Amino acid sequence: MNKLGLKLFVLAILAAFWACSGGGYKKTSNGLEYMIHAQDKDAPKAEVGDMITAILVYKTANDSVLLDSRKNPSPFKIPLIASEYPGDIYEGLSLLGKGDSATFLILADSFFIKTARASLPSFIQSGSKLKFDVKILDIQKKADYEAEQKEMMEQQAQEMQEMQAKEQEAMSQYLKDNKITATPLESGLYYIEVKRGSGAKAETGKKVKVKYTGMLLDGKVFDSSENHGQPFEFNLGTGEVIPGWDEGISKMKAGGKAKLIIPSNLGYGSRGMGNIPPYSTLVFEVELVEVN
């Protein structure tokens, strides 16, 4: 074998050894395998309690991607906690500062069972390792993050109060514009009978069929039984529908029609639903088709 052939042979042996030993990876005293790609040695490292914003991609041993945070609509955030076992992802994150990037190899069994609190997926081989690619975008101290969250919650609470006030104003204007003088029930529900039914009375526990059209106060229709091709069927008084429906339908008999003006506390409240904004008063035109 000539010198070139011998050199290539040696390189091949070294490459094979490099691959088998996880070439380029170092180990912490706890056994965490890591490879630093970029690191500012002067940048402060993340500490327990800090909130980390990062790009996180982790894969199986055969490079099947399990999670890629770049596909999420909002940045990936994770609080740094004390390591739960030697060589876990939290130990890896504590090695990094803002702007740093690295790859960590972690036993799949340990990650899923101890960190994710889940069983090992059937498509992942026990004893195999997961590859975590991490780039730290930002590190917030615990006190700063908590202060930010407190300010955000206070702002949200203020916005909710303003929305509640606007709901009351909009309700009053709607009643005035539509010349509605009915007195609301104790709950705040407005039940306006349009046609008295002559059939069976709707009572708690009975199954009822209802045709309906649901609107916001501005007249925008957000749902209708016509769109579904059949009346809506549910068990009355069992919490299957919003409270305003349970109360309003219970005042009807089969064949009857009514208008329900439902304040948000009897509807979807502060969370809203689909194209229904938070703190929305709802108007339903309903017909009780059948009571079983």
Image (tube, rainbow, N blue to C red):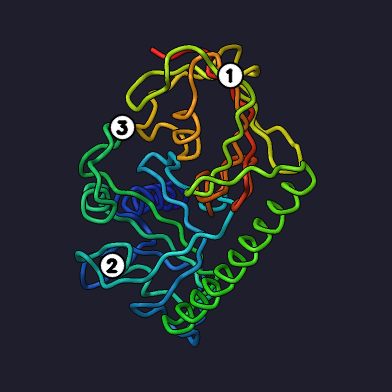
Q: How many marks?
A: 3
Instruction: Look at the numbered disc 1 and give the secondary structure of its residue.
Output: strand
Q: Looking at the picture, which amino acid does disc 1 mark?
A: Lys
Residue 91 lies left or right of residue 234; in this view the side is left
The residue under the point 52% across, 43% down is: 267
Q: Which quarter of the figure has residue 181?
A: top right
Task: Give how far apart the Cα atoms at labels 2 and 3 are.
Answer: 27 Å
282 relative to 80, above or below: above
Q: Is residue 211 or residue 35 the one in the foreground?
A: 211
Residue 218 lies left or right of residue 208; in this view the side is right
Residue 37 lies left or right of residue 32; in this view the side is right
Q: Earlier in the sequence, mark 1 or mark 2?
A: 2
Instruction: Look at the numbered disc 2 and give the secondary structure of its residue.
Output: strand
* Percent coordinates x, y for residue 139 in the rendering: 49, 76
Residue 107 lies left or right of residue 191; in this view the side is left
Quarter of the image with the N terminus in it:
top left
Numbered label attached to residue 265:
none
Mark 3 — residue? Answer: 123
Q: Looking at the picture, which amino acid does disc 3 mark?
A: Phe
Mark 1 — residue? Answer: 211
Instruction: Look at the numbered disc 3 and give the secondary structure of its residue.
Output: loop
The residue under the point 55% across, 14% down is: 255
The residue under the point 26% across, 73% down is: 82
- The crowd level at tag 2 (other Cα within 10 Å; few <14, some 14-19, many 20+) is few
Q: Is residue 55 or residue 183 the one in the foreground?
A: 183
Q: Are the residues at dot 3 and dot 1 in contact (C-beta closer than 8 Å)?
A: no
- The crowd level at tag 1 (other Cα within 10 Å; few <14, some 14-19, many 20+) is many
Q: Looking at the picture, which amino acid does disc 2 mark?
A: Lys
Numbered disc in front, either 2 or 3: 3
Task: Give how far apart the Cα atoms at labels 3 and 1 are.
Answer: 47 Å
Mark 2 — residue? Answer: 27
Task: Give how far apart the Cα atoms at labels 1 and 2 are.
Answer: 67 Å
